[in-house]
Amino acid sequence: MAEKITIGDYTVTVLSDGYSNLPPSAYPGADFSRLPGLLGEDGTYRIRIGAHLVQGPAGTFLIDAGAGELSMPFPAELAEANGLSNPPQHMASAGNLPAALAASGVAPEDVTGIFITHLHLDHIGWLIKDGAPYFPNATAYYGAEDWGLLVDAVAEDDPTRVLMHQADKAGILRTYESGDYELFPGLSVLHVPGHTPGHVMIALESGGQKLWFTGDLIELPSQLTDRHIHFMTDVDRALAANARDRLFAQAKKEQIVIAAAHLANPSFRKITHNDTWTDATAAAVIA
């Protein structure tokens, strides 16, 4: 059963596309010996790959677009560097988003908008399938600042570059306006660079309730209180940490629901008065 939450007149559903198994070195500054229960028996931290489905008065749209059909073996050199004697077979495996959409009663043609938090492959993978848009009626929005680093600066056969050029040729791409602004009533985009230059957060507000889709602004639960934990692909660690400090203080004060791209169990969280996570769909405080 997919996780869901109601925000005013909107229903938000977690869509799983697959998973990624990440070694401790993926999180510089994290001491996993002080974070019991996060690492599996294979010594990696498993995160969800997927998207969020939003349904309400403005229609049916997605926040991010999963990784596409992906099967990435776990690199032997990464296993050795992290001292993993029995590493998982895959570092990433995905391809389940169509089934997750269907289980929610949504067909690809029902989706009219895709709001991308940043241009890493695990957030854009289903924009294109077999060279054509997978969501035929959808316009995809992204932060223009990401293109130079994540598309132009990579090899010609890089999957992200290939996919984004195909999407551009198909005419489905639009860039967000500069600065923070309202996409349409109840949905706003806030620029929070740090993880990538064009990383954005999407804010949903309806019926006096608020939810923030924070993308990869936070990837490990302990980043709530430990600003020295980073992610290996953060392009500006200080900028990302400062954004977390500022936004989480506001989320705590206003009791805004946090929906991060990769946090699960639960996927929808709030911040308590004493800086711990609580399940936004229940009253339980969690680690």
Image (spheres, rainbow, N blue to C red):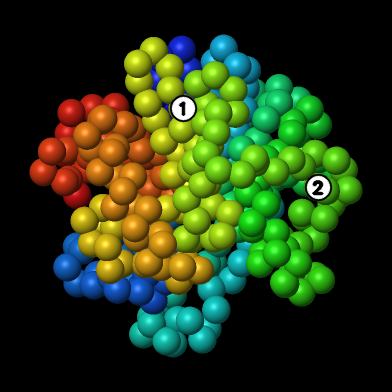
What residue would you read off at disc 2? 167
Could you give the CA–CA distance between mark 2 and mark 1, rounded to whole angstroms? 26 Å
- Please tell me which of labels 2 and 1 falls first in the chain: 2
Circle 1 packing at 10 Å, graded few (<14), some (14-19), many (20+), is many
- Residue at x 29% of width, y 45% of height: 248
Asked whether the beta carbons under mark 2 and mark 1 sit within 8 Å of each other, the answer is no
- Residue at x 50% of width, y 21% of height: 186
Which residue is at the far right? 169
- Left or right for 110, reference 93: right
Name the disc covering residue 204, or none. 1
- Left or right for 52, reference 257: right
Which of the pair 215/244 is nearer the observer?
244
Name the quadrant containing residue 65.
top right
Q: Amino acid at mark 2?
A: Ala
Callout 1 secondary element: strand
The spot of residue 25 in percent (x, y) is 39, 76
- Residue at x 54% of width, y 52% of height: 199
Q: Is residue 100 visible?
A: no
Name the disc covering residue 65, or none. none
Callout 2 secondary element: helix
Above or below — where is 68 with respect to 235?
A: above
- Left or right for 91, reference 44: right
Above or below — where is 14 with respect to 19?
A: above
Name the quadrant containing residue 153.
bottom right
The spot of residue 188 in percent (x, y) is 52, 31
Q: Amino acid at mark 1?
A: Leu
The spot of residue 104 in percent (x, y) is 56, 24
